[in-house]
């Protein structure tokens, strides 16, 4: 579904916050307690796939943040597409860094630092980029097909409508001032756009990367790359076809305060019960479907089912797990608002403790304690 909308912010305000009903126990989701799933809790999943796209000349976009998904206080997300030759114009973000994953197609980014250094790179499907807060940048679609990508920002209140765009700035500055600053005549300034362009599809089309250079002489490249090929990385863990790939500040040093990864779950597989001591987790289902379990302490817990295009969110420190209960594989993008990936897995936690502690805690016979895990495993398979 497409919506023609000249003002992105209005499209955001018009969407009510998502609040699914509390769910009673079921045969599939039966716990030892009689908890009503989701009672007294915010939604930890958002049906992003149902949100209409906003159409621009050369691309589309839609976004999710605290304004429609209240629990996502630490991160917001934008889904965007660009047609070949289209550009997300030069802009910057004052309140958040941008971490991006290319789902499909090919893109080219430019990134300029406060020191006047630049990176111009092509980022293809499976690739990442990271733009520090306040740095100037742009994104182009290279073709042959449309580029589709996700932008994740480390501030849940982030809105694309509050972006600082170059055409918006120039059109809201006195003409004589712009002319003086750029060294051109007022008549030439008058030919510039009269409002924010946001996404544009006008010639010239981008050329080969090898011949794409900064206009100025002596412009230096950034000392470290702000792009990373996550899709080609060797998995850090694998079991019976399920895998996880991670790009932390260790693998991707430019992304010092955000990390992310790809989780692939085969049918019946589970990313085991765990929590993250230092970061929230933002999730996007790339394909397939998954179930999300979240434990919020004080006898409260939630169960959700997410399909392709949906977003999940787990606040820092909340216990959770992801499971594929379908007959087809599922791929999930996960993003963290800390560059240092930390996870404590339930079976690994149990393995570090003596039998006496476990027996006293769980109040079970020694035979059951003996059967408990002795090592940590990211995945389990039914």
Image (tube, rainbow, N blue to C red):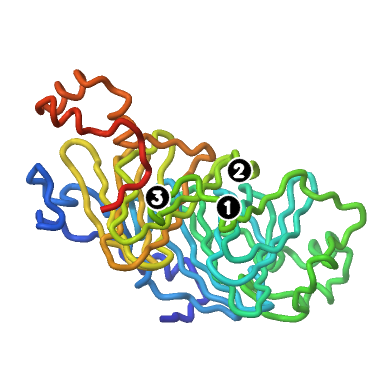
Q: Earlier in the sequence, mark 3 or mark 1?
A: 1
Instruction: State the image coordinates of residue 65 (x, y, percent, origin top left).
Output: 41, 57
Q: Quadrant of residue 349?
A: top left
Q: Nearer the viewer, residue 337 or 76?
A: 337
Dot 3 falls on a residue whose secondary structure is strand
Q: Which residue corresponds to mark 3?
A: 239
Dot 2 falls on a residue whose secondary structure is loop
The residue located at (20%, 45%) in the rendering is: 301
Q: Which residue corresponds to mark 2?
A: 251
Asked whether, in this view, residue 104 is left or right of residue 24, the answer is right
> How far apart are the alpha carbons under marks 3 and 1?
16 Å
Q: Earlier in the sequence, mark 3 or mark 2?
A: 3
Q: Earlier in the sequence, mark 1 or mark 2?
A: 1
Dot 1 falls on a residue whose secondary structure is loop
Q: Quadrant of residue 164?
A: bottom right
- Dot 1: within a 10 Å radius of its alpha carbon, few (fewer than 14), some, or many (20 or more) residues? some
Label pair 3/2, CB-CB below 8 angstroms = no
Q: Which circle, 3 or 1, is nearer the viewer?
A: 3
Instruction: State the image coordinates of residue 362 (x, y, percent, origin top left).
Output: 14, 28
* Badge count: 3
Is residue 266 visible in the rendered structure shown here? yes
Is residue 17 visible in the rendered structure shown here? no
Q: Which circle, 1 or 2, is nearer the viewer?
A: 1
Quadrant including the N terminus: bottom left
360 lies above or below 373: above
Q: Which residue corresponds to mark 1?
A: 233
The residue located at (33%, 66%) in the rendering is: 307
- Dot 3: within a 10 Å radius of its alpha carbon, few (fewer than 14), some, or many (20 or more) residues? some
Q: Which circle, 3 or 2, is nearer the viewer?
A: 3
> How far apart are the alpha carbons under marks 1 and 2?
10 Å
> How far apart are the alpha carbons under marks 3 and 2?
22 Å
Asked whether, in this view, residue 43 is left or right of residue 87, the answer is left
């Amino acid at each position: 579904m497409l919506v023609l909308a000249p003002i992105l912010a209005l499209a955001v305000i018009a969407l009510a916050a998502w609040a699914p009903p509390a769910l009673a126990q079921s045969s599939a989701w039966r716990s030892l307690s009689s908890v009503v799933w989701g009672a007294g809790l915010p939604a930890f999943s958002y049906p992003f796939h149902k949100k209409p796209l906003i159409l621009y000349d050369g691309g589309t976009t839609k976004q999710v943040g605290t304004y429609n998904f209240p629990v996502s206080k630490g991160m917001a997300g934008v889904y965007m597409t660009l047609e070949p030759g289209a550009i997300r114009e030069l802009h910057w973000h004052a309140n958040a860094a941008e971490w991006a994953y290319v789902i499909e197609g090919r893109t080219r980014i430019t990134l300029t630092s406060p020191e006047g250094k630049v990176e111009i790179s092509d980022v293809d499907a499976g690739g990442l980029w990271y733009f520090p807060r306040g740095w100037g940048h742009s994104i182009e679609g290279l073709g042959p097909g449309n580029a589709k990508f996700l932008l994740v920002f480390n501030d849940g209140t982030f809105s694309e409508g509050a972006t600082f765009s170059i055409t918006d700035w120039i059109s809201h500055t006195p003409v004589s001032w712009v002319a003086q600053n750029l060294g051109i005549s007022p008549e030439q300034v008058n030919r510039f756009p009269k409002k924010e362009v946001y996404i544009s599809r006008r010639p010239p089309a981008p050329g080969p990367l090898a011949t794409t250079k900064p206009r100025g002489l002596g412009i230096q490249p950034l000392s470290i790359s702000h792009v990373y090929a996550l899709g080609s990385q060797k998995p850090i863990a694998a079991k019976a076809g399920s895998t996880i790939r991670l790009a932390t500040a260790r693998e991707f040093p430019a992304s010092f305060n955000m990390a992310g990864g790809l989780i692939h779950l085969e049918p019946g597989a589970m990313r085991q019960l765990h929590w993250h001591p230092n970061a929230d987790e933002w999730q996007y289902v790339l394909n397939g479907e998954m179930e999300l379990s979240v434990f919020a302490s004080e006898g409260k817990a939630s169960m959700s089912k997410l399909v392709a295009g949906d977003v999940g969110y787990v606040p820092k420190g909340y216990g959770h797990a992801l499971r594929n209960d379908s007959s087809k594989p599922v791929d999930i993008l996960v993003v963290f608002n800390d560059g240092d990936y930390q996870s404590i897995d339930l079976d690994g936690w149990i393995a570090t403790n003596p039998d006496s502690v476990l027996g006293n805690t769980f109040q079970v016979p020694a035979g059951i304690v003996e059967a408990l895990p002795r090592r940590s495993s990211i995945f389990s398979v039914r």
